[in-house]
Image: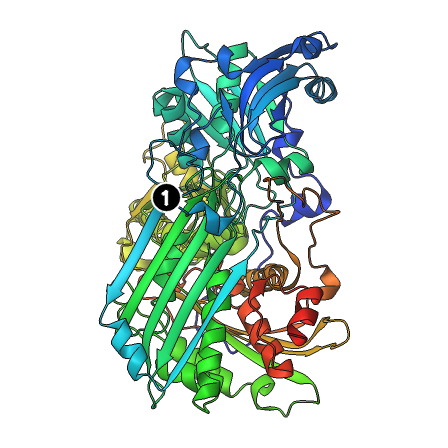
Amino acid sequence: MGQLVATDYRVIGQRQRRQDAGPRLTGRERYTADLVLPGMLHAQLVLSTQAHARITAIHRDAARAHPGVVDVVTAADLPAFTRDDEQLVRESFFLAHEVVNFAGQQLAVVLAESAVAAREAADLVRVDYAPLPVVADLDAALGAESERLRPSAESNAGGVARFERGDVDAALAQAAAVAQGRFTSDGVYQSYMEPRAVIADADGSLADFGTLTIYTPTQGQFAVRQFVAAALRMSEADIVVQPMTVGGGFGAKFVLFEALVGMLALHSGRPVKLVLDRGDDFIATINAPRANYDVTVAADVAGKITAIRTEIVHDTGYFAHSPYQLAGTMIGSWYPAANLQIRSTEVYTNRPGAAAYRAPGLTMMAFVLEQLIDDLAGQLNLSPLALRQANAAQTGDPMADDSPWPEQELSKLLDAAARHPLVTAPKDSGEGVGVSIGMMRGSTEPASATARLVGDGSLQVSVGSIDLTGTNSALGQIAAETFGVEAGQVRVRTAPSNIAPHSGGTGGSKILYTVGNAVVIAAEDARRQTLAVAAGELEVAPDDLELVDGVVRVKGSPDRQLTLEQVVGLTTGMNARHGPIHGQGNAANIERAPGVTVHIVRLRVDRETGQVDLTGYAALHDAGKAINPAEVDGQIYGGIAQGLGWALYEGLLYDDQGQPLTASYMDYALPKASHVPTVDIDIHEYPAKHGPYGAKGIGEPPVIPAAAAIANAIHDATGARMTHLPMTAERVWRALRS
């Protein structure tokens, strides 16, 4: 644990147990799959077995005759506006109509009185296909001869991000050192503990839309409302999203099946529940995409990075949503160079659509760039840390898009890393040391919150943000500090979309940074109202009052006081003389607060098996201000565990006909607890100017450097350079012999 900044805060900076710890640890937390509504039907998806084919017939008579089955729904049963096989947006896709475009695409739904009956009947549905050419190879997908998956497009290329400045060719010609290579990565499954689940309940029908309530474990309830309303051609005012407990999201659980399940509820006139099993979740959802990188980096004799040239290709599957933009931006921003030539493209293939996964695209990007930085250091006889210290972006430096880096203190973390024992201690025989940086520009989004005093004198804070990682507990600490009570006197609740204050989705490392400011304003407003009421009753000015231990009292005359319960009594009930205490906060923080980190790894490699053994791990992170250091530690540990998965174990594999080869945990490897080393977590606090009490986002940076630091340590230990994620034991073994 690093040294935290000393303050006179009462609540901020204290280690607190999460507000939801009890229900989660005792099994009392209610998830979407636990919810039962009267008259509810159970839905089972019928998924395509082909990666690309024309649907010639769907035989559903046997399924319809199965006991307990109410209906078997295909696209032909739904309104005409749902029959769009070329829909670009996965979140708005209903059922395949004429063509399937990946194995696992939904093309029918069984509705039954029980989940068992629905599952059994789905196995009875038979589909006739006319096969079409499969676009499976990522490089071939861009070729002129490749099958066009979207007939209206000139190629299979989707979005393209380009960043250029200076003269890259001239810089490469004049360089003292040039590092280059081709790197590839398999796709990665987010491996949340709770598979996808949605319930929809409609009080209208397809002919007469009423209110539609969606129960979903989403990371962004207002995004769900927007997408469902647009897809179903309803007013957002008629959509109510009830956010449920999220059993792990990591960027994947924003919107996916909500519009389809909503349509099924309207179609059937009954509540509909869809819960995927793990096998369907593997093949029918959205994952972090595979990618290819061709990158060249150059430096002059003094060790200044002068040029970066990249060609990045992300497999976006059949739907557009890969992290091509972010990856292209960041690869030209971590080490500002006068000469850039960057192109980052997403390519359509016959695979499921892509999704975010914790710092989307940046774990792979760091794996590439940070290895090339090490290669440059070796050519120039510089230490890897020295080259980074001389080149890493500082506040105000230009990013790839020429916007300046917001204020950040990566250079201080690098200086601390250079003094860390994992760097300075002598290496044992066969041991290697690797380092990597990680940087996120950070995101912003307007947010609102409310804070009201309730009957027992506690403060009830309402937000619209989704708590994935203990943010509601941290927001409670912020409210307690601001209002002037202990953390145990504050409860933070996420309200449903029809009454919740607005908030953006939980992602982009921004909830505490954005919603936290709204909570500060709301708590300040509630405090002002509380003091104003007490001032009127005690016949003093509000400035003459203090709020201590749940009591409002006159400074210097503690016997003249009102408890918070008494204040509530004066603002509610019959004949009350004051309005209720109800604070409101609206915030629009437009300045980003980057998240930065440095990871250091020590390891050994068994040359006979390729097995990697981590012997030391350190993570230096800037938390801005650690509102709850226990949660910061948890985020860092969790990010590193996932980073180890990216690095050494996890990869989604398909054959050349687009068939999934890793469709269960029997085939898809995850790191075990025993694989995660003890981590020396070093939290640094460089307060963000516009964050609540100086806090900034911490959720995404911890995953970014892990694979890169491990790859650099493998090279330091063995001389082998790794070019493919995951770096399985077999791949390491082969690299040692290449």
Q: Is residue 202 above or below residue 587?
A: above
Depth check, front residue: 577 or 656: 656
Residue 172: quarter of image = bottom left
Q: Is residue 476 above or below residue 182?
A: above
Residue 294: quarter of image = bottom left
Q: Report x, y in % for residue 573.
A: 41, 29
Which quadrant does the C terminus fall into?
bottom right
Left or right position of 672 against 189: right
Task: Determine the residue located farthest toward the right in the rendered image.
Answer: 608
Quick check: can you spot residue 691? no
Q: Report x, y in % for residue 460.
A: 46, 42
Q: Report x, y in % for residue 616.
A: 65, 78
Left or right position of 70 against 289: right
Q: Is residue 16 above or below residue 138?
A: below
| Badge 1 amino acid | Gly
Name the colouring of the figure: rainbow
Quick check: can you spot residue 567? yes
Which quadrant does the N terminus fall into?
bottom right
Residue with the mark numbered 1: 158
Left or right position of 368 against 665: left
Packing grade of label 1 (10 A; few <14, some 14-19, many >=20) is many
Depth check, front residue: 115 or 528: 115
Residue at x 65%, y 63% (from the top left corner)? 648
Labels in figure, total: 1
Q: Report x, y in % for residue 92.
A: 43, 29
Residue at x 60%, y 82% (from the top left corner)? 719
Task: Determine the residue located farthest toward the front in the rendered image.
Answer: 145
Residue at x 34%, y 58% (from the top left corner)? 343
Assign a secondary structure to mark 1. strand
